[in-house]
Image (spheres, grey):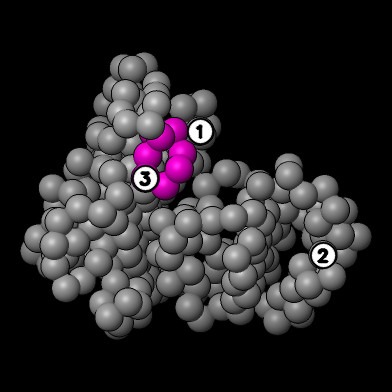
């Protein structure tokens, strides 16, 4: 089994774990060092740690792992960056928009990246051979192509940036703010744009950005923007630069 197959198998195991409706304790803060704070700085739920253990079991043979929950673990020439649950607050609230993010880095750069929507089984993969979209419940794969006429964008953390909300509204741009940045980036080919404002960690964006390699991209320490359309990209980028 190669890395890609192992990562998909890990996602499938986590997907079925959640489909089995684990008891409420899985969605409560885990007891760990730092009063339940993981290596990425967020409070860890028990489900975060359960998912992390599954990924470590499947992916440890392929390199050293850097996970949002436990931090660095293992050895190897290659590095695997994992967010075991992207959108923990959503999953704890029963809102169906949460997933996982995995990226294998070779020589410091993303080589294979996989983001999975655990709510419906969609997953997105980029390898050196190209990118595709599939579902954990099907054997069919589709080339990752852009939607011709998307009508919405995705603006993560919109609640914290009313000035940007007003700017996008003035441009006539509709958007949603679903609350899982890696997953939103994975859907970047299907929407008008994806915008995230605020400080972020590598766990949050590495796999999602790799999936968007063929889209217009702007990244700085407090912002991530991708779009399939140049005029949309330039208009939002101008708003960002003006502040």
Give the alpha-carbon distance from disc 2 to disc 3, as whole Å. Answer: 31 Å
**Residue 231 in sight:** yes
The mark that comes first in sequence, 1 or 3, is: 3
Query: How crowded is the residue under tag 1: few (<14 C-alpha within 10 Å), some, or many (20+)?
Result: some
Query: How crowded is the residue under tag 3: few (<14 C-alpha within 10 Å), some, or many (20+)?
Result: some
Residue 82, placed above or below residue 62: above
- Residue visible at 76% across and 78% down? 234
Q: Nearer the viewer, mark 2 or mark 3?
A: 3
In front here: 171 or 45?
A: 45
Label annotation for residue 39: 3
Residue 31 part of the magenta segment: no
Q: Nearer the viewer, mark 1 or mark 2?
A: 2
Label annotation for residue 243: 2
The mark that comes first in sequence, 2 or 3, is: 3
Name the secondary structure under disc 2: loop
In front here: 26 or 79?
A: 79
Residue 45, picture quadrant = top left
Which percent across, then down, holds residue 225? 64, 68
Write the start and end of the magenta stretch as one range: 37-45
- Residue visible at 18% across and 49% down? 56
Which percent across, then down, holds residue 37? 40, 34
Residue designated by label 1: 89
């Amino acid at each position: 089994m190669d890395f890609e197959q192992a990562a998909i198998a890990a996602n499938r195991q986590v997907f079925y774990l959640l489909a089995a409706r684990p008891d409420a304790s899985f969605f409560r803060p885990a007891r760990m060092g730092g009063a339940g704070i993981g290596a990425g700085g967020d409070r860890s739920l028990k489900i975060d740690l359960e998912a992390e253990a599954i990924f470590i079991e499947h992916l440890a043979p392929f390199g050293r792992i850097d996970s949002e929950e436990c931090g660095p673990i293992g050895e190897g020439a290659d590095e695997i960056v994992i967010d075991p649950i992207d959108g923990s607050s959503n999953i704890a609230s029963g809102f169906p928009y949460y997933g996982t993010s995995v990226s294998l880095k070779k020589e410091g750069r993303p080589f294979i990246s996989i983001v999975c929507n655990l709510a419906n089984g969609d997953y997105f993969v980029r390898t050196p051979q190209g990118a595709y979209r599939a579902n954990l419940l099907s054997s069919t794969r589709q080339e990752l192509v852009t939607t011709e006429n998307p009508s919405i964008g995705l603006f993560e953390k919109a609640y914290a940036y009313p000035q940007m909300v007003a700017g996008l509204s003035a441009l006539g741009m509709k958007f949603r703010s679903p609350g899982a940045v890696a997953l939103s980036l994975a859907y970047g080919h299907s929407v008008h744009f994806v915008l995230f404002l605020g400080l972020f960690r590598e766990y949050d964006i590495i796999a999602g950005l790799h999936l968007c390699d063929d889209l217009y991209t702007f990244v700085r320490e407090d912002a991530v923007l991708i779009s399939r359309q140049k005029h949309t990209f330039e208009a939002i980028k101008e708003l960002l630069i003006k502040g």
